[in-house]
Amino acid sequence: MHVTVTEQCLEIQLEPMERVWGCHVSGKIEIRLADIQSFSAERPESHWRELRAPGTYVPGLIKAGTYYSDLGRAFWYQRPGQDCLCLDLREGYYKRVVLGSDKAGQWRSQLQAALTTRDPAV
């Protein structure tokens, strides 16, 4: 997966197999920076009440796709042992996006820099 932070948005480009595991027809997810309420390195807890539709879940291997919970619609692509980037969103198709990658720390730094440039009060 490739994540790009621009002045206006965060773009997530999924690789072909990530699209398959995540059951995501479009290979791209765009999130406006203005819609990002908060972000963290903490992986949110999964709950048995989440509804996976559509997506893939293999315990200890992968959690990918669209999940519904009390929070709303979320997109996950997480494997065990990966660093995490968790985005909580104000508006948009998803209310939360959880991404796992060895580059998650780098993405958090880029996102922090973009949000600070955009709004110094962040």
Image (cartoon, helix red, strand yellow):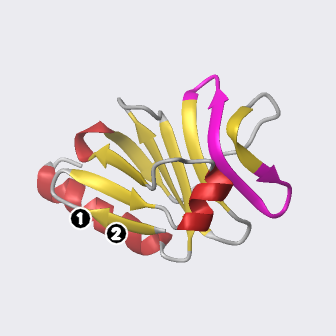
Query: Mark 2 falls on what kind of element?
Result: helix
Which portion, as a residue range, is magenta?
A: 57-72
Q: Is residue 36 left or right of residue 1?
A: left
Q: Which mark identifies residue 24?
A: none
Q: Is residue 87 left or right of residue 110?
A: right
Residue at image point 39% right, 44% down: 38
Q: Residues within 10 Å of mark 2 (few under 14, many from 20)?
A: few
Tag 2 and tag 1, C-beta contact below 8 Å:
yes
Number of marks drawn: 2
Marks 2 and 1, how far apart at CA: 6 Å
Residue at image point 18% right, 47% down: 121
Q: Which mark identifies residue 109?
A: 2
Query: Percent x, y for residue 3?
Result: 38, 65
Is residue 58 among the parts visible in the rendering? yes
Query: Percent x, y for residue 11?
Result: 33, 57
Residue at image point 25% right, 51% down: 9
Query: Mark 1 falls on what kind of element?
Result: helix
For residue 55, above or below residue 113: above
Residue type at mark 1 is: Ala
Q: Which mark identifies residue 113?
A: 1
For residue 119, above or below residue 1: above
For residue 17, above or below residue 122: below
Of residues 80 and 12, the one nearer the viewer is 12
Q: Is residue 7 left or right of residue 40?
A: left
The image quarter in which residue 48 lies: top right
Asked if the stretch drawn in magenta spans residue 59, the answer is yes
Is residue 43 among the parts visible in the rendering? no
Residue type at mark 2 is: Ser
Asked if the stretch drawn in magenta spans residue 15, the answer is no
